[in-house]
Amino acid sequence: MFPLYFLVKAALLLLALLCFIVHKPFEPSSTRALVQSSLLTVAFLTNLVVRVHLAPHLTRLIAIKMAIESEEGLGGEVGSTAPGRLSHCPHYMKLHRAFRRVHSTIAAANMASLTCTAILVSYQALKFTT
């Protein structure tokens, strides 16, 4: 389910970008159109990179981490990042740090994409009010 979110989001952003390009003739002097197309492109590429490069790595880390935790009888807690008894296992701690790093990168990319989308929506709202 996790990688599907970024795939659907990238596909919808690509569709929005293509519609914008087709229905909005390019005007070199229009900074508004340049900003909008740039934001759509950045949001699309961000989601595509997350889906293609980061999401598979994260799902692999999650599967390995869950297998180790289930062997130890851990991992049933929701919202806890404390490794518990596994804090003394160097292999698990290396895996846990890698998971946190990739997950944080994906979260930052998602926030960047959402920011681009929010700015685009505000551009559209301003267009309707003026």
Image: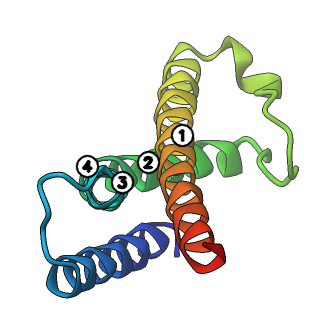
Q: CA distance from mark 1 to mark 2?
A: 7 Å
Name the quarter where the C terminus is drawn.
bottom right
Q: Position of residue 94 (x, y in %)?
A: 50, 19
Q: Earlier in the sequence, mark 1 or mark 4?
A: 4
Q: CA distance from mark 4 to mark 3?
A: 21 Å
Q: Position of residue 129 (x, y in %)?
A: 66, 75
Numbered badge on residue 116: none
Q: Answer above or below: position of 101 versus 1.
A: above
Q: Which is nearer the eye, 71 or 78?
A: 78
- Check disc 4 and report the residue beneath it: 53
Q: Residues within 10 Å of mark 2 (few under 14, many from 20)?
A: many
- Residue located 60% across and 67% down the image: 126
Q: Earlier in the sequence, mark 4 or mark 2?
A: 4
Q: Residues within 10 Å of mark 3 (few under 14, many from 20)?
A: many
Q: Earlier in the sequence, mark 4 or mark 3?
A: 3
Mark 1: which amino acid? His
Which one is in front in this view, the residue at disc 1 or the one at disc 2? 1
Q: Earlier in the sequence, mark 1 or mark 2?
A: 2
Numbered badge on residue 39: 3
Numbered badge on residue 58: 2
- Residue located 37% across and 56% down the image: 43
Which one is in front in this view, the residue at disc 3 or the one at disc 2? 3
Q: Position of residue 80 (x, y in %)?
A: 85, 39
Q: CA distance from mark 3 to mark 1?
A: 23 Å
Q: CA distance from mark 1 to mark 4?
A: 12 Å
Badge 3 element: helix
Mark 3: which amino acid? Leu
